[in-house]
Image: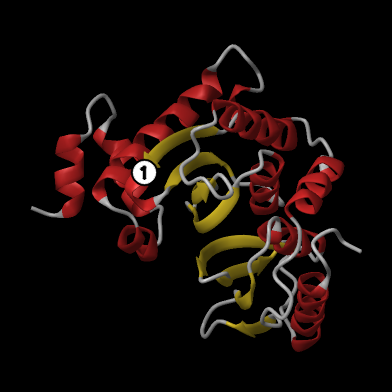
Amino acid sequence: MSRQQRITETVTGIHTEEINAHFNLLPERYFVQTNDRELTLHIGMVNQLLHSISSADSLGSLRPIIEWIDEPARGLSIAHIVTWDRAGLFHKLAGAFSVAGLNIISAKITTRSDHIAIDTFEVSEPGSGPVRDGHARALFAQTVEAFLMGNHDLGAEIAAQIKKFGNPVPGATSPSVEVYLEIASPRAIVEIHAPDRFGLLYRVGHIFAEQGYSLTGARVHTHHGIAIDSFFLESDAKVALDSARLTQLKSALIGTLSQPSDGS
């Protein structure tokens, strides 16, 4: 029995056609990175998002679907977010975690070919493991909705939280950024090794949005205080990704990663 058949037999209350579409609309790397429990969860979350289109609330289809899973043995919580893809989605989600005072440990970013984004973040309360604080979860959800549905500018709140949690330790490794084109694809790949700091992913994602890129995938990890991140980008305007644009992106990333966390 194939994995697709096994999942189809496990999931209840969702049409087989919708489950088949989930398998057909996602890249192979998603299935490599996603276990059966997460895959089943995501199918249900996508179903909720699709049903929200017919909601009496005209904004219902814009409201993200969020599910939390605690993993106390690993000292973290996992936030699963399913929403319609849109410009700057990644940096808005990362910014919402910053506003809520949560630290991002890792992230997996995937977008279906029908523009439904499936994003998974491993997060923690600074110094205290899983996200036990219900207020932090509620604040994250409120902030995401303010960003995505109201397009509110939360720069001041994010800056305050970044300043609160400070800079990396003195003498930490200098940031390293590599930007290059993926072979046989119009995508650019960005690889970053940098001292981890509160709000780092918000800063990086903001640069992508400012320079006209959409994020089609990401692998984000933190190991011994060092962020080891890979991002896959496409040009929003479908403008050719020539060496001048890639050099400009690299310079902007090095510039923002070299700044103190308070932006001074």
Most extreme residue toward the left, as rendered? 1
Mark 1, other Cα within 10 Å: few <14 / some 14–19 / many ≥20: few
Picture quadrant where residue 239 is located: bottom right
The one of 165 and 3 positioned closer to us in this rendering:
165
Q: Residue furthest right?
A: 264
Position of 121 with respect to 254 (left or right) is: left
Q: Residue at x 51, y 57 (%)?
A: 107
Residue 61 versus residue 203: which sits nearer the camera? 203
**Can the viewer see residue 114 in this picture?**
no
Q: How many marks do you count on the picture?
A: 1
Residue drawn at x 84%, y 40% is: 153
Query: Which percent across, then down, holds residue 97?
Result: 64, 44
- Which color scheme did the rendering employ for the protein? secondary structure
Can residue 250 be seen in this snapshot?
A: yes
- Residue 145: horizontal and vertical position, in percent? 67, 31
Could you tell me residue 58's position as x and y percent? 66, 19
Residue at 53% in and 63% down: 217
Q: In the image as oriented, which residue stretches furthest toward the top?
A: 56
Apparent side of residue 3 relative to residue 158 in the rendered image (left or right)? left
Split into 4 quadrants, where in the image is the C terminus?
bottom right
Residue 205 found in image quarter:
bottom right
Q: Mark 1 = which residue?
A: 72
Question: SS for tag 1?
Answer: helix
Where residue 141 sits in the image (x, y, percent)? 61, 31
Q: Which residue is found at the position 81% from the left and 85% from the top?
A: 244
Name the kind of residue labelled 1 in the image.
Pro
Above-or-below relation of 55 to 254: above
Residue 89 lies left or right of residue 111; in this view the side is: right
